[in-house]
Image: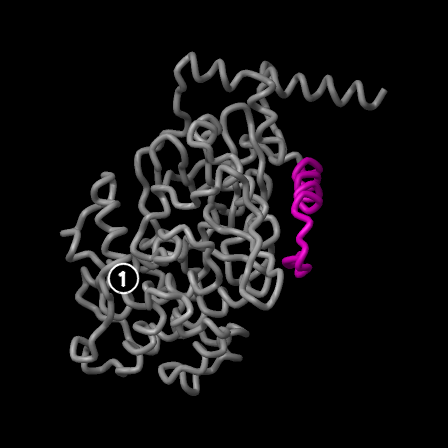
Amino acid sequence: MGIRTSKQVEVDDFLEVFGEENKRRHVSRADFKIIRQISNQTGKSKLFQVESLKDQQPYFMKQLSKFEIYDQREIERVHRELSICSLLMNTKYVVNLHYAFQDLNYLYLIHDYKNGPNLTQLLKNMKVNRVQIEEAHAQFIFSYLLLGLEYLHKNNIIVLGLRPENILFDDEGYPCISGFQHAIIENQRNNNRQYDFIQSQEDDDIVNDDLITPYLAPEVFLKQKPSFEADFYSLGMVLYEIITGERAFYNNLNGATLKKEEERQELIKFILQQKTQILKAELREELDPTSADLVNKLILKKPENRTGFYGIEDIKKHGWLKNFPWQKIQDRFIKKYGLKKQNSALAQKTINQNVSDLLSQQNQDIVNTIQFQEKFERFYYSSDDPNDFYYKSRIEHEKIIKK
């Protein structure tokens, strides 16, 4: 099933069909065996590599704490993530969603498993081994990501969260976009570049701590409603890092991890005020100077000045991509960057496994109410616990309806 191309996306109807499909297959947490834990965003989100007990296929499982989502006022965000991921099924440019369900305490999103590293790890490994990326490889990565953005933009989706750690490589070396928790659906109303966004009151300020990175476009920090050029800015910052081997603003922050509020504010100040560019004199000799020109034109502060503002074809026609084999990469005929067997270990390393977090009794009492559980009704509710009060209440409700 491909993405629906109607400008008026009936998200709720589609989610109902997607939820019914999950219900028909009766998928639950018990259907997946945890292989390893990959990441742990304290409290809210954890990422696991899992194996399906039904077909032995590997998947990524994203586990989200319902209480933390509620406490951080991100219920609409996670519903929008589900909406967008549900619409993006069986497409080669993204990490596809296969299942979405919930139990009493958690939401679960089951995605494609990608055996390769993410872009951050790939660049880090090259740096450790003192290997510099070839220009043709940089063009390959950039161009396929550009095709992915073109596909998403044609279907009114702005990623907003494009960054190296959200770019995963498959076995053939093609980059896939993941991380749609900050994505938005845009409906164009007229030709005057005025837009209406599908979002709720809790999204009046769409910038939260997770989104504050060097890759986020300046207009978002200025609370302007972003359009497709925001993704081009992010892609330009990604290309900046591919070419230079350094993250923009890294030197200014002295390698800060951006965990503290003052460090985040410093980063925002640099993004808004400091001119960022690659000087041709700073490029490696073997790189074409037009690569720096493209980066510099994508990361301009004002969106209307960026290459791509008048259409993505302007980026494709840039001198750095002159004579690029667009049809070959779109058809995935380029095979030279496939992962070598020894590099499969570049996939994200295992960290200490901790599947469940215990809530305080006060917080668990909040979770154990019908009113709380109904806030997540777009996710198919699946529980294997016979003592789950909400699961039992739904069963009783369905019995009453059938009568």
Q: Residue furthest right?
A: 403
* Image quadrant containing the C terminus: top right
Q: Nearer the viewer, residue 249 or 176?
A: 249
Residue count near mark 1 (Cα–Cα under 10 Å), binned few <14, some 14–19, many ≥20: many
Pointer 1 residue: 123
Quarter of the image for residue 361 reads top left
Task: Answer above or below: position of 367 versus 185.
Answer: above
Residue 240 colored in magenta in the image: no
Task: Answer above or below: position of 101 versus 263.
Answer: above
Quarter of the image for residue 155 reads bottom right
Q: Nearer the viewer, residue 129 or 120?
A: 120
The residue under the point 36% across, 61% down is: 341
Q: Is residue 249 left or right of residue 78?
A: left
Element at label 1: helix
Task: Answer above or below: position of 265 versus 298.
Answer: above
Q: Nearer the viewer, residue 153 or 27?
A: 153
In the image, residue 177 lies at what x, y percent?
45, 58
The residue under the point 44% across, 60% down is: 170
In the image, residue 375 lies at what x, y percent?
58, 28
In the image, residue 160 lies at what x, y percent?
43, 54
Span of residues in magenta: 1-25
Rendered image coloring scheme: one colour
The residue under the point 41% across, 60% down is: 169
Q: Is residue 118 visible?
A: no
In the image, residue 327 lies at what x, y percent?
53, 79
Dominant secondary structure of the residues highlighted in magenta in the image = helix
Q: Residue furthest front?
A: 192
Residue 18 colored in magenta in the image: yes
* Image quadrant containing the N terminus: bottom right
